[in-house]
């Protein structure tokens, strides 16, 4: 979780510098809403095609992806990454740290 919090701080800083504090707040709210949705529906995200045991969920309206793992009944958020979607294959390419 500490890396996920660091990711949020980086996203906030980037959005404040390149956009505005209002935009940063909107993005962070969207990411948090997606995380709360995963808490209530842990199977909502797709299994990672790259790493066994990891799942990912796109953040609605923004180019971010939550990478998480299920441990028992707990959703453990590992990263909040910038992402781009490949419209031909539907694959998600992650920009940022790897677990």
Image (tube, grey):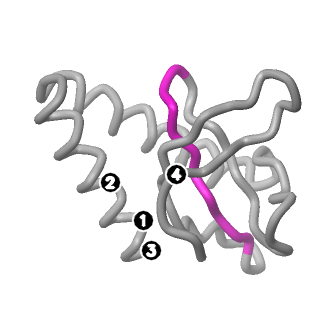
Name the image quarter holding the N terminus: bottom left
Which is the main secondary structure of the residues drawn in magenta?
A: strand
The answer to whether the residues at label 4 and label 2 have Cβ atoms under 8 Å apart is no
Q: CA distance from mark 3 to mark 2?
A: 11 Å
Closest to the observer: 86 or 77? 86
Residue tagged 2: 8
Residue tagged 3: 1
Q: Is-magenta flag for residue 62? A: yes
Closest to the observer: 98 or 61? 98
Q: CA distance from mark 1 to mark 3?
A: 5 Å
The percent coordinates of residue 35 (x first, y second) are 54, 49
Q: Earlier in the sequence, mark 4 or mark 1?
A: 1
The answer to whether the residues at label 3 and label 4 have Cβ atoms under 8 Å apart is no
Residue 25 falls left or right of residue 98: left
Q: Secondary structure at mark 1?
A: helix
Asked if 55 appears above or below 14 in the picture, the reply is below
Q: Residue at x 33, y 39 (%)?
A: 28
Residue tagged 4: 95
Q: Residue at x 63, y 38 (%)?
A: 58
Q: Residue at x 66, y 72 (%)?
A: 74
Q: CA distance from mark 2 to mark 1?
A: 6 Å
Asked if 10 appears above or below 22 in the picture, the reply is below
Q: Earlier in the sequence, mark 3 or mark 2?
A: 3
Residue 8 falls left or right of residue 40: left
The answer to whether the residues at label 1 and label 3 have Cβ atoms under 8 Å apart is yes
Q: Which residues are magenta?
A: 61-70
């Amino acid at each position: 979780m500490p890396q996920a919090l660091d990711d949020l701080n980086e996203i906030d800083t980037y959005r404040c510098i390149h956009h505005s504090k209002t935009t940063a707040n909107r993005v962070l709210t969207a990411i948090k809403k997606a995380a709360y949705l995963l808490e209530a529906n842990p199977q909502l995200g797709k299994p990672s095609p790259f790493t066994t045991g990891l799942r990912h969920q796109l953040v609605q309206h923004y180019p971010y992806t939550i990478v998480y793992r299920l441990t028992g009944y707990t959703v453990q958020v590992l990263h909040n990454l910038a992402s781009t979607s490949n419209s031909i294959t539907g694959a998600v390419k992650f920009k940022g740290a790897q677990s």
